[in-house]
Amino acid sequence: MRVSRMLCSLVVASLVLVWLSASRAAHDPVVVGSLDVTGSDTLAGLMMRWGEQFERRYPGVRLQLQASGSATAPPALTQGTSRIGAMSRRMTDAELAAFVARHGYPPTRVPVAIDALVVFVHRNNPLEALSLSQLDAIFSDTRRCGADEAIDRWGEVGLDGVWQDRPIDRHSRNSASGTFGVFKREVLCHGDFRRDVNRYPGSAAVVAAVAESVDGIGYAGMGYVTAAVKPLALIDAQGQRREANAVTAIRGAYPLTRSLYLYINLPPDGELPPLERAFFDLVLSPAGQARVREAGFIPLPEAALQAARATLKLDADTLGPHPDSVDP
């Protein structure tokens, strides 16, 4: 009799679980399909991590990524060839105007991570730090940040001995890159790059080029910096040396801190479709933000994370404490 009662209880419990699962499935939208994302090369590695995580959670979806640079995101969103645009900078006024002219409302900008743009040299270079004015004099021929003369040799930034007369070998992202745009705005004071600057379509290529050139200098998002190159501290306007790390970036102390964004075509008062909603729910969760740290970037602080979820009308109550965030 006792065994019979236990079997009956197990059967009833199983039926209840089946009913609850069926009820939940009836109310939850099915998450299937292809999610197209266009834009930033800087975000490419992180997007792939999110894509793999997303596909494991929802086997019926596929993330399709075209990472040709931030400049490719706005036209893709405007023309409707992609619903999500990945950008390592904010859209320009002209890009926003083109989108509004087509759709009648602006795209929704969602911060998803924090980055520090790192300047680096060859690992054997003894240099430790540079000021933004010195960087402008190295990379620009307009020198709008105040330098009197161009800097062409390592001796002109304080190196001596065998380094004194060595020429500086410059490496940069190309003009389609959001990283290029941030560097041009913040380091060159909106000036022009020198013609002898080598340009690359990807951040990994810039790192590789500097790693192979003893006289090289370049820049990239912090997630791309490897042991093959040597990061430099930056000297701010007050003469303080600032290292690129989570604390200085979130507090705004590091001069080249930026947010990384996903833009989406979302009408005012509109609701995210099930596929996009599930994706952003993952990205803006502790599990999704853990991938940010794995990719070498900085997770959003808790307040910024909750604000981003509120922008997309995601249920904040489902979000627990965020272990990877650093409060400013």
Image (cartoon, grey):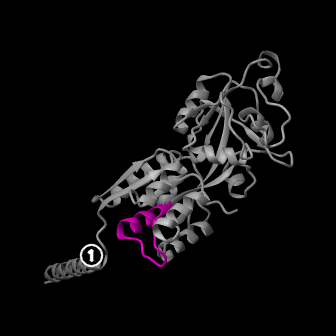
Examine the rendered structure and indicate whether residue 20 appears above or below residue 44.
below
Quadrant in which residue 96 is drawn: bottom right
- State the count of labels: 1
Q: Secondary structure at mark 1?
A: helix
Tag 1: amino acid: Ala
Q: Residue at x 47, y 79 (%)?
A: 269
Residue with the most extreme front position = 101
The picture places residue 114, in percent across and down from the top left corner, at 61, 55
Q: Which stretch did the figure color magenta? A: 263-283
Q: Residue at x 68, y 38 (%)?
A: 119
Residue with the most extreme top position = 162
The picture places residue 133, in percent across and down from the top left corner, at 80, 40
Compared across the picture, whether 272 is left or right of 152 comes to left
Instruction: Count residues near mark 1 (Cα–Cα under 10 Å), then give few for <14, some for 14-19, many for 20+.
Output: few
Please state, as top left, top right, bottom left or bottom right, where the C terminus lies in the image.
bottom right
Is residue 8 visible in the rendered structure shown here?
Answer: yes
Magenta-drawn stretch contains 281:
yes
Compared across the picture, whether 53 is left or right of 101 comes to left
Q: Which residue is mark 1?
A: 25
Examine the rendered structure and indicate whether residue 256 appears above or below residue 251.
above
The picture places residue 191, in percent across and down from the top left corner, at 72, 42
Q: Foreground: 196 or 138? A: 196
Magenta-drawn stretch contains 24:
no
Compared across the picture, whether 82 is left or right of 324 comes to left
The picture places residue 83, in percent across and down from the top left corner, at 41, 61
Compared across the picture, whether 255 is left or right of 205 comes to right
Examine the rendered structure and indicate whether residue 1 appears above or below residue 311.
below
Q: Foreground: 78 or 218? A: 78
Is residue 286 visible in the rendered structure shown here?
Answer: no
